Amino acid sequence: MRHRVAGKKLNRSMAHRKALRRNLITELFRHEQIRTTRAKAQAIRGHAEKLITLAKRGVLAGEEDPAKEVHARRLAAARLNDPKVVQKLFNELAPRYESRPGGYTRILNLGARKGDAAPMVIIELVEED
């Protein structure tokens, strides 16, 4: 029974899953859309949206207390691989989604991959510039 077991294993070890998730989310924020399999896109979607919400709250709290924004930036930096992407998350993406209550990503189906028939998708950030 899988009671209270969250997330997909993706046929990888824990460290490999964690690295894959960090890399995919970093690239999603860098390019604002990536092409991947449906299972991987669904696995990172919630984590990416939580990071955007963290950035939004950090920017809003930073207006009153700058230490709260620094704390949020450090939490985001712990989950992403690139400091430039963290900077983009707080300076560009958080203000873009300031008035949006959630649903920052969209998954579009592309069909099956030619080699192994894996379902391919594009996961992208909504409201592009």
Image (cartoon, rainbow, N blue to C red):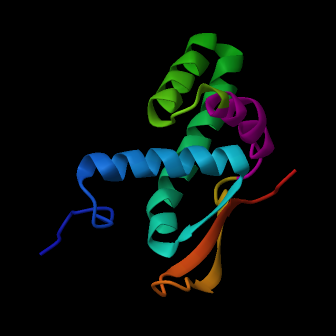
Q: Nearer the viewer, residue 6 or 112?
A: 112
Q: Residue at x 62, y 13 (%)?
A: 65
Q: Where residue 17 sits in the image (x, y, percent)?
A: 34, 53
Q: Residue at x 51, y 36 (%)?
A: 80
The quadrant in which residue 11 appears is bottom left
Q: Is residue 53 left or right of residue 2?
A: right
127 is higher (above) or lower (below) than 86: below
70 is higher (above) or lower (below) than 96: above
Q: Where residue 47 sits in the image (x, y, percent)?
A: 48, 51
In this view, the residue farthest toward the front is: 115
Magenta span dominant secondary structure: helix
Q: Nearer the viewer, residue 2 or 116?
A: 116
For the image shown, how many numbered marks are present on the structure? Answer: 0
Q: Where residue 29 sits in the image (x, y, percent)?
A: 65, 46
Image quadrant holding the N terminus, namely: bottom left
Is 37 inside the magenta-drawn segment? no
The quadrant in which residue 84 appears is top right
Q: Residue at x 71, y 52 (%)?
A: 32
Which portion, as a residue range, is magenta?
A: 85-100
Q: Nearer the viewer, residue 104 or 121?
A: 121
In this view, the residue farthest toward the right is: 129
The quadrant in which residue 63 appears is top right
99 is higher (above) or lower (below) than 69: below
Q: Residue at x 66, y 36 (%)?
A: 56
Q: Is residue 48 left or right of residue 122?
A: left
